[in-house]
């Protein structure tokens, strides 16, 4: 349980709501809980029975709450005056939100529901309480002049303890509702995998679902996990889209059942995007949810799909038709494996990095254009920089919109055209061609709708060409329309993500049949 303490006006309730949402746990305000239990306001209790009577009620209530279900709990500013309450909190993670006296008063001076505001010695009360807050706090965060979401993010960083990583490692914090975790991007990470896993005495064993093409990588991960005193079982699987199906799910889930893997144990995926997808789907459904760690070995998995929690398996009718959202507890992306796997998912990874560059307002587009030669030659330093910057953009988006109800939909840029191209051409393994062509088609659509000029279309073409990705292709409109009927984002017609300028993506855009015909004609000719 996470308990927020601090003086009135520190922002415990506001920050607590943000934290609870990000952590996927309930939020409880002890003052509100007390008022609900009594059917009276705290102001009334103070006036009728006095502060001492209220503090006894408060202590009993906090004791009940701490013994209850896991939650983010915000305490009243004076709750820690009782040493019994301070003792109870030793079993919890206490976060002290610091606020200066003058700023606290400026935030709450007009709040008529705070009886302590009437005290003549309020400044002395403030000074006395500071020691109690600091005494019990495991984490202290300053709130002066700061927005609640920024304070909450600092708390999340402290709660998600950053393990020791090699110099130069990018440690990217991902904070969706389904769970907060780090994505570590760097080199020399495989032999440290065991130390980067979530620290928990509950983990007795791990099942490593590994690509049959990444045996040596899985050897290093398994040795590191075993060194942490965790029993390891290894399950090799094919690392192809064609094998990512229900039969594979049954096979892997059967292995988990055979070793009696429990919810608090761990599924570790070591492989490319298909293996991470498969392991994620099994972890999400086995025992109604099991911990998951991802060690992606290809560029497309490292730069895109490993974070965000989406996983899916294929059906005969189409790709990724069955899936869940199940966040990992950690992502370990050693870029040396991606650079050694240029024949698997490398161009697809470059296309996803290009997508993130085109839809975001960061400088990634400029960085990608400048480092395209190094990226194409699998230069480790160039790839490290691009994967880190790409994941920072995606982490920011999925942290705000885990389930793609709003902002996350921009990550489908190029995918609506691209997935249809996959179906029309029978493309199974993702080599980046379809998304590249999809982004070019989306650029042509934006130009025809008057959203962008030729310069933006040309910027797409030049970037993708420099990355060795295709920019032209001929496709039949009727076949594409049939494919769009299977699009997961289909809403009374196919809808596209287009740009209103570089870094300015708009979702839910429709287009007439005639305009789509013109777009496909542009794609074939230009």
Image: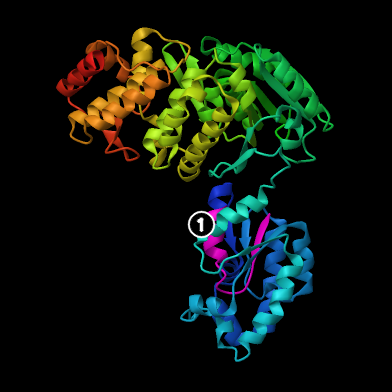
Give the vertical position of 181 relative to 516 (above or below): below
The relative height of residue 57 versus residue 356 in the rendered view (above or below) is below
Against 341, is 400 above or below? below
Q: Residue 421 versus residue 75: which sits nearer the camera?
A: 421
- Observer able to see residue 388: yes
Looking at the rendering, the stretch of residues picked out in magenta corresponds to 1-19
Residue 259 visible from this viewpoint = no
Task: Identify residue for label 1.
Answer: 149
**Picture coordinates of residue 18 (x, y %)?**
52, 55
Would you say 199 lies left or right of 109 here? right
The picture places residue 413, in percent across and down from the top left corner, at 36, 30
Viewport quadrant of the C terminus = top left
Which residue is found at the position 63% from the left and 50% from the top? Answer: 157
Residue extending farthest top? 426
Residue 296 quadrant? top right
Figure quadrant of the N terminus: bottom right
Q: Is residue 12 magenta?
A: yes
Give how far across and how far down residue 257 sits, in percent.
Answer: 72, 21
* Front in this rendered view, residue 1 or 31: 1
Instruction: Specify whether 431 is left or right of 445.
Output: right
Left or right, 472 with respect to 163, comes to left
The residue sitting at 38% across, 30% down in the picture is: 412
Question: Looking at this view, is 65 or 120 the one in front?
Answer: 120
Is-magenta flag for residue 243?
no
Q: Residue at x 61, y 86 (%)?
A: 122
* In front of the other: 351 or 37: 351
Numbered label tally: 1
């Amino acid at each position: 349980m996470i308990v927020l303490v601090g003086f009135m006006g520190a922002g415990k309730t506001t920050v607590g709501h943000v934290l609870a949402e990000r952590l996927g746990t309930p939020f409880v305000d002890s003052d509100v809980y007390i008022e609900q239990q009594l059917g009276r306001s705290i102001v009334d209790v103070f006036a009728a029975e006095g502060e001492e009577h209220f503090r006894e009620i408060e202590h009993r209530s906090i004791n009940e709450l701490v013994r209850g279900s896991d939650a983010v709990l915000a305490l009243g500013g004076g709750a820690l005056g009782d040493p019994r309450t301070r003792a109870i909190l030793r079993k919890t993670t206490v976060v002290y939100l610091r606020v200066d006296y003058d700023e606290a008063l400026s935030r709450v001076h007009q709040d008529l529901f705070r009886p302590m505001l009437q005290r003549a010695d309020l400044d002395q009360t403030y000074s006395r309480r500071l020691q109690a807050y600091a005494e019990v706090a495991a984490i202290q965060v300053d709130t002066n002049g700061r927005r609640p979401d920024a304070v909450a993010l600092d708390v999340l960083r402290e709660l998600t303890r950053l393990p020791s990583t090699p110099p130069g490692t990018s440690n990217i914090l991902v904070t969706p509702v389904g769970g907060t975790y780090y994505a570590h991007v760097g080199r020399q990470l495989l032999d440290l995998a065991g130390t980067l896993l979530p620290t928990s005495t509950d983990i007795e064993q791990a099942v490593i679902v590994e690509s049959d093409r990444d045996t040596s990588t899985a050897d290093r991960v398994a040795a590191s996990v075993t060194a942490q005193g965790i029993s390891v079982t290894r399950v090799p699987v094919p690392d192809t889209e064609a094998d990512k199906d229900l039969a594979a799910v049954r096979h892997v889930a059967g292995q988990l059942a055979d070793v009696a893997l429990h919810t608090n144990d761990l599924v570790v995926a070591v492989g490319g995007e298909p293996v991470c997808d498969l392991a994620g789907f099994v972890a999400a459904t086995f025992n109604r949810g099991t911990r998951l760690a991802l060690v992606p070995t290809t560029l497309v998995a490292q730069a895109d799909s490993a974070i965000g929690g989406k996983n899916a398996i294929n059906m005969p009718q189409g790709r990724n038709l069955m899936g869940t959202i199940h966040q990992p507890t950690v992502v370990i992306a050693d870029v040396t494996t991606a650079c050694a796997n240029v024949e698997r998912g490398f161009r697809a990874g470059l296309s996803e990095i290009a997508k993130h560059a085109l839809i975001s307002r960061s400088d990634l587009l400029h960085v990608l254009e400048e480092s395209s030669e190094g990226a194409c030659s699998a230069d480790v330093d160039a790839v490290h920089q691009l994967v880190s910057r790409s994941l920072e953009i995606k982490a920011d988006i999925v942290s705000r919109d885990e389930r793609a109800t709003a902002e996350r939909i921009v990550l489908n840029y190029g995918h609506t055209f691209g997935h249809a191209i996959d179906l029309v051409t029978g493309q199974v393994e993702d080599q980046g061609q379809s998304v590249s062509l999809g982004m070019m088609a989306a650029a042509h659509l934006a130009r025809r709708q008057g959203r962008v000029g030729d310069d933006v279309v040309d910027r797409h073409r030049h970037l993708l060409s420099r990355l060795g990705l295709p920019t032209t292709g001929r496709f039949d409109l009727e076949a594409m329309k049939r494919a769009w009927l299977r699009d997961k984002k289909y809403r009374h017609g196919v809808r596209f993500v287009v740009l209103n300028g570089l870094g300015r993506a708009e979702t839910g855009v429709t287009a007439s049949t005639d305009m789509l015909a013109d777009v496909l004609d542009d794609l074939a000719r230009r």
